Image: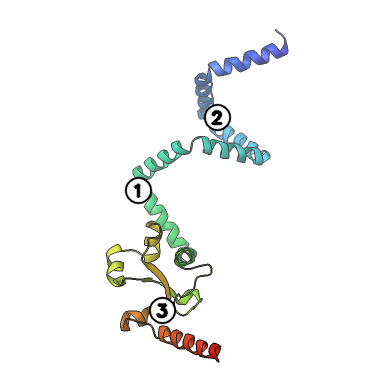
Amino acid sequence: MNQIEYKNYQMEWRKKNKDYIKKCRHQYYLMNKNKAREQSLKWKKNNKKRYKKLMVDWIERNREKLRLYHQEYRKRNKDKLFQIGQRYREKNKNRELLRHRNERQQIKLIALIKYSKNPPECICCGEKELSFLTIDHIRGGGTRHRKNIKTGIYRWLKKMNYPRGYRVLCMNCNFAIGIFGFCPHQNLNLKRRAKNEIIKNK
């Protein structure tokens, strides 16, 4: 048997005895945990790019398997994961507050762009300052709706895939419409249009 034939024989044998090889490797690992870990870490350190590619490929092949595993793990270890999360949040309070604030601002910005344009602006007066802009219920009933959904309006809109019936207004315009039923800017806009028409006709 020459070298090529021997190599082919080894490959065929490995294919036929996958379970046996896996079992032997597992037994070796259990008997030599520290040594195996050192070898593994050393190999990963010396082959970072290859290891990364192997991991990405493995995750792609086993995505559904991983999803089910993590789902089951979360169910079995709810209390443990909650305690870990709680300890982390207490230890990194400022970091978590900043992360949540940035997340809320990003969700708000996406919602405003969906119902306006990029950058978003008030449909009534043209205000573009993000801090002043808000979502308005076109048919009213915003307060009742916010109580019913029991979550932030921007998160709810994202969850519902941005349904119709909403628009972007600034706080002033939204408040005026809620109190008076109309916004003073509407009258100003009509006066400006009339004035422009008069100037054009002269």
Give whichever of 51, 142 is nearer the camera.
Answer: 142
| Coordinates of residue 54 in the picture (x, y in percent) | 59, 36
Q: In the image, is residue 152 above or below residue 17?
A: below
Figure quadrant of residue 151: bottom left
Residue pointed to by mark 2? 32
Q: What's the residue type where badge 2 is placed? A: Asn
Please, what secondary structure does the residue beneath circle 3 have?
A: helix
Q: Nearer the viewer, mark 1 or mark 2?
A: 1
Task: Name the quarter where the N terminus is drawn.
Answer: top right
Of discs 3 and 2, which sits in the foreground? 3
- Amino acid identity at mark 3: Met
Residue denoted by label 1: 78
Left or right, 201 with respect to 46, comes to: left
**First along the sequence among labels 1 and 2:** 2
SS class, disc 1:
helix
For label 1, count other residues whose C-alpha is less than 10 Å away and answer few (under 14), some (14-19) or many (20+): few
Between the C-alphas of marks 1 and 2, the distance is 33 Å
Q: Secondary structure at mark 2?
A: loop
Q: Position of residue 146 (x, y in %)?
A: 31, 68
- Ranked by sequence position, the earlier of labels 3 and 1 is 1
Mark found first going from the N terminus, 3 or 2: 2
Rendered image: mark on residue 171: 3
